[in-house]
Image: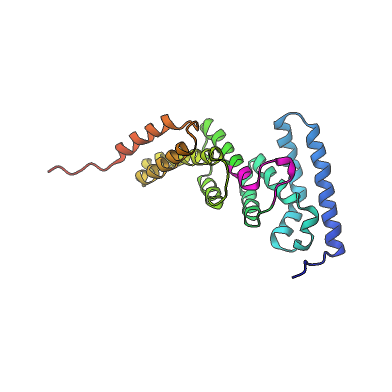
Amino acid sequence: MAAPIMSRAAATAAAQVAARLTFDLRRLKEIKAVSRKIDAKRQMLPEYRSWIDGLMSGALQAGAGASGDVLPTIMVWYIDVGDYAAALPLIEHVLAHKLKMPARYVRDAPTLIVEEIAVAAMKAQSAGDPFDLSLLETVEALTADDDMHDEVRAKLLKAIGYELDRTAYAAAQTGGDALGLLSRSILALRTAQDLNARVGVKTFIRGVEKRIAAAQPTPPEA
């Protein structure tokens, strides 16, 4: 089947959004501080919303090729600013359609997504803050069949294991299934350890093992 012919309006919109991205990337390159880059991306993102919505709905598919770097770039920016609710549909789209990342990102899409989400989670966890477990597990499921370095996959599994342990603690306070969550946590952590012996979970695994032992139901007396 022949590719759809791009309308003049679609071609114009594609050229405009591509030009905007080029301009914004130049602006970002001039900013040295990471925190200021993130603030700048947060201000830039609304300008791409209508274009992204059009691509996601299929209305602009005919013109997508003219600005193919935009959607993957905006996906990364949403991750950078911590807007994971906005990032997830783009993550799903990029992975489902096997979109290539712009050359400046070096890593392929699955590797970049897994590593950036894992690093964001571990940063939050190190600060004592929770991270969205469903996002972590969704990313793991979406990329389960993708080939990537073991060290990258181990980071995500470590983050999942930590968050499951945190969730288990909360469940224990309300009579929930802490044991089931801890069992999932230890599986994720051991898999991370198997993938990368230096991922840094050995001590944490021992702690989870103790919590599992403590959560086991007490056998009835004879």
Residue 21 screen position, x and y as percent: 80, 46
Vertical comparison of 204 with 171: above or below: above
Above or below, 48 relative to 34: below
What is the span of residues highlighted in magenta in the rendered image?
100-114
Question: Residue 5 sits in which quadrant?
Answer: bottom right
The dominant secondary structure in magenta is helix
- Percent position (x, y) of residue 107? 66, 42
| Residue 7 coordinates in the image, percent (x, y) | 84, 65
Q: Give the number of callouts.
A: 0
Residue 69 relative to residue 209: left or right: right
The N terminus is located in which quarter?
Answer: bottom right
Outermost residue to the left: 222
Q: Which residue does the image show at 20% across and 43% down from the upper left?
A: 219
Judging from the image, the colouring scheme is rainbow
Magenta run includes residue 209: no
Which quadrant of the figure contains the C terminus?
Answer: top left
Q: Out of 164 and 151, give the one closest to the viewer.
A: 151
Image x and y of residue 67, in percent: 79, 53
Q: Residue furthest bottom?
A: 1
Question: Can you tell which quarter of the image residue 111 is in?
Answer: top right
Depicted 218 relative to depicted 91: above or below: above
Residue found at x 70% / y 62%: 57
Q: Would you say residue 113 sits in the magenta stretch?
A: yes
Between 173 and 61, the one nearer to me in the picture: 61
